[in-house]
Image: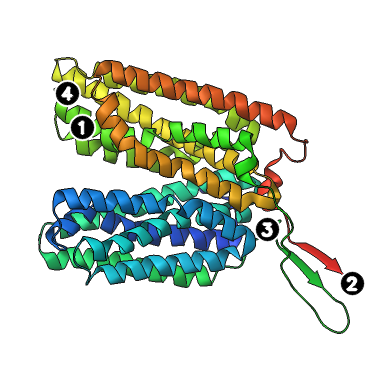
Amino acid sequence: MQRTAGIRRIASIPPLPGGQDGRRMLWINLVDKTGSGLWVSVTALYFVVVAGLSPGSTGLLLGIGGAFGIAGAPVAGRLADRLPLTRVLLGIQLLRAAAGFLMLPAHGFWQLLPLVAAASFGERSASVLTKLFAARVAGPDRARYQAVQRTVVNIGYTIGGLAASAALAFGSTAVYRLLLLGDALSFVLVAVLVARCAEPPSATRTVVTHTGAGALAAPAHPAVSSPWRDRGYLGYAALDSVMFLYGCALSVGLPLWIITRTTAPHGLAAAVFVINTVIVVACQVRLSRHGRTPRIAADALRRVGVWFLICGTATAAAVVHAPWAATLAVLGSAVALTVVEMIQSAISWELSVSLAPADAQGAYVGVHGLAQSTARCVGPLLMTSAVIACGPAGWLAFGAVLACAALLQRHLVLRRLGALRPAAAEPALSVAPVTVSEH
């Protein structure tokens, strides 16, 4: 009887959206992020120990290279509207692999700068293209697919990070080069997997067939909408860039706060990342329900605002003198930031796609990709020079500003959804079928 009940529970689990290509894209994400996990934790050390740069030059190199990455999201999105998405993604992965291989013999600031810029451009481009692919193959179930994908991404980063930590125990330059080589090889394997993916349906590509004498297939490029002239979407993306600052709060602000302003054990600075990863892997799929439809996603922004307030309050309270109380406050802040990450990522995924017109989905999602890139560039400086510098008041203001951004975004999204035709507000925007006409 128990065995029968177990079989029924397994049978009731819905299949993963996207079919075979959807599953293949999950493997692509796992390999990609495992390789990235090998490299991201030793990037700065590699440039200092192996490439011979000073810490100041390394920071300048990463800052300028990261600025080039900002262009990756809108450029890749626009190309995805004009060209087959899988071929664009294949080219981007090969670019990332080439940058990694060429970085191995490179030495000095000016040799490394174009390679770091190319790698940053490729990383942001691949992120947008992977998102578009998932939205197109998963259709109305894209929220659940996104949750599974984020879980896989965190597993990949964890595997790569643990492998890098074990390798660093040897501490030789050869180890650093092997980690970079592993990252570059992961992009080659990803490119092979991408080449095996079928092109997902898109509203901007038309297939025309002729009966009788043969068949003709050609993409059509009609006039499309421009996200740069859509003030409503730009306002939505700008508010998302504010809310994406939670990432810098978790990676930069909270660790520095623990070490410089609290009596909590310094080991918590590293433990917050473990806490974040474990909670995301365990709960992301369940919390994907907050992005099931555009209206549900908009309403969930109120919860995001509440969690932002909890985060700011808990972090500010961590200055108490008792170490045990400071530890509890830090842990509460880490949990609050992780809940924000899980809910807001599901909301952002859904709204960035569903608020975009079908004829320019790639361009719109590419512009939305600027939100996270901008937060990554501005966030570290904001954390150190404003939030932490102002003490507990800085964290309270940080939580309040982000909460207000969430509520304002909810207002803008609901107004936009109300202005759309009922059909245009449905999740099917992301899966417009290939148009076929017979002559």
- Residue, disc 2: 439
Q: What kind of element bears circle 4?
A: helix
* Quadrant position of residue 439: bottom right
Residue 428 coordinates in the image, percent (x, y): 70, 46
Depicted 120 relative to depicted 5: above or below: below
- Residue, disc 4: 261
Residue at mark 4 to residue at mark 3: CA–CA distance: 51 Å
Q: Which amino acid does label 1 sit on?
A: Leu
- Residue, disc 3: 202
Residue 289 visible in image: no
Could you classify mark 1 by the number of other residues whose Cα lies within 10 Å: few (under 14), some (14-19), or many (20 or more)? some
Q: What residue type is labelled 2?
A: His
Q: Is residue 69 left or right of residue 252?
A: right
Could you classify mark 3 by the number of other residues whose Cα lies within 10 Å: few (under 14), some (14-19), or many (20 or more)? many
Q: Nearer the viewer, residue 116 or 33?
A: 116
* Quadrant position of residue 380: top left
Q: Residue 256 carries which label?
A: 1
Q: Which residue lies furthest to the front in this view?
A: 110
Residue 249 visible in image: yes
Nearer-N-terminus badge (3/2): 3
Asked if labels 2 and 1 touch by Cβ distance under 8 angstroms, the answer is no
Asked if labels 3 and 4 touch by Cβ distance under 8 angstroms, the answer is no
Asked if labels 3 and 1 touch by Cβ distance under 8 angstroms, the answer is no
Quarter in which the N terminus is drawn: top right
